[in-house]
Image: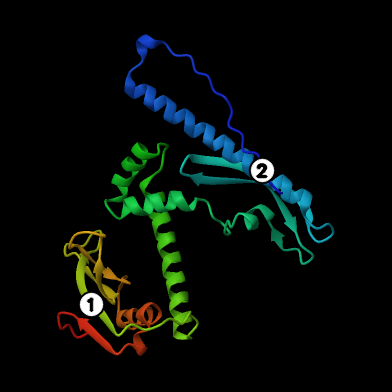
Amino acid sequence: MNTIAITFPKVKVNAEIKDLTFDNIEDMIFEISQNIACRVFEKALTDIDSYLRSKRERGKLKNTGKRKKYFLTRFGDILYLRTRYKDKKSKARYLLDEALSIVKNQRISLSRARIECFLSALSSYREVVEGIGLLIGGPRCHEAIRQSVIKEGNLIIENQEKKLRQIENLNYPDKEAPDTAYMEADATYISLQNRGKKKKEKLEVKAGVGYTGKEARYKTGKSKRLKEKFTFIGIGKDFMRNLSLLAEERLSLSKVKKVIFGGDGDSW
């Protein structure tokens, strides 16, 4: 079996008891554990890279040496070396990136990006910097977080559009349609940040939900929840089209005997 040993080093810290408080002990242990995690992470990546180099097919890829890569993780910044190869068409390849599903030019881990995106949905980017410092630690400027959120948002939109095209081309698993499907849609407005403008512009954001009825939330009690529920948020004139496509995939909408749609009567 192909395995890798991930080893955590022993750490011993001597500290004067008279200078200690509960809080600075907590901070010290947290910082040490993060530093250890970063070094362990770097060593694991280096070991995997070495393994892939030794197991690669000879004659197909040319080893062109090591390249540095910085990566931001939930533990902090890591720096490691990975082997760069060239194939017979002189195209650069990194077997480590391919093996670990690291996309081209990726500089932040998925979990770290999700944390930053989640916090950014709750407060301003400058406030997120403070939140990141409390939860994870380490320096991170608000503009870097903003750019990370924009990048992740673009990827979400790209993947969503790809999925909608697949549904439109009937490229999705068939499922049995319910007798009744329920659809609801509404909209709200959010203010946009426009520097230098006295009057703030607003963006209409539309939200939709689909489900097949209600079911008991718990084994006992009267609490209910929506059955086979899905939600969708979007903007623009294609919202209803996209909501209908998702409903087709989730609820087989075109085969449903009865569709009950709820809305406030808006023209869209």
Q: Inspect this view and state whether residue 36 appears.
A: yes
- Residue drawn at x 76%, y 63% is 90
Pointer 1: what residue? 184
Q: For this rendering, which residue is in front, 193 or 94?
A: 94
Q: Inspect this view and state whether residue 194 appears.
A: no
Tag 2: amino acid: Ile
Q: CA distance from mark 2 to mark 1?
A: 50 Å
Residue 207 falls in image quadrant: bottom left
Horizontal arrangement in the rendering, residue 21 relative to residue 64 (left or right): left
Crowdedness near tag 2: few (<14), some (14–19) or many (≥20) residues, C-alpha within 10 Å: few
Residue that sits furthest to the right in the current view: 59
Q: Which mark is residue 14?
A: none
SS under mark 1: strand
Residue 18 falls in image quadrant: top left
SS under mark 2: loop
Pointer 2: what residue? 4
Instruction: Give coordinates of residue 183: x percent, y percent.
Output: 25, 79
Instruction: Give coordinates of residue 186: x percent, y percent.
Output: 20, 75
**Above or below 87: residue 23:** above
Horizontal arrangement in the rendering, residue 51 relative to residue 79 (left or right): right
Horizontal arrangement in the rendering, residue 150 relative to residue 257 (left or right): right
Tag 1: amino acid: Glu
Whether pointer 2 and pointer 1 mark residues with C-beta atoms closer than 8 Å, the reply is no
Q: How many labels sit on residues? A: 2
Instruction: Give coordinates of residue 19: x percent, y percent.
Output: 36, 12
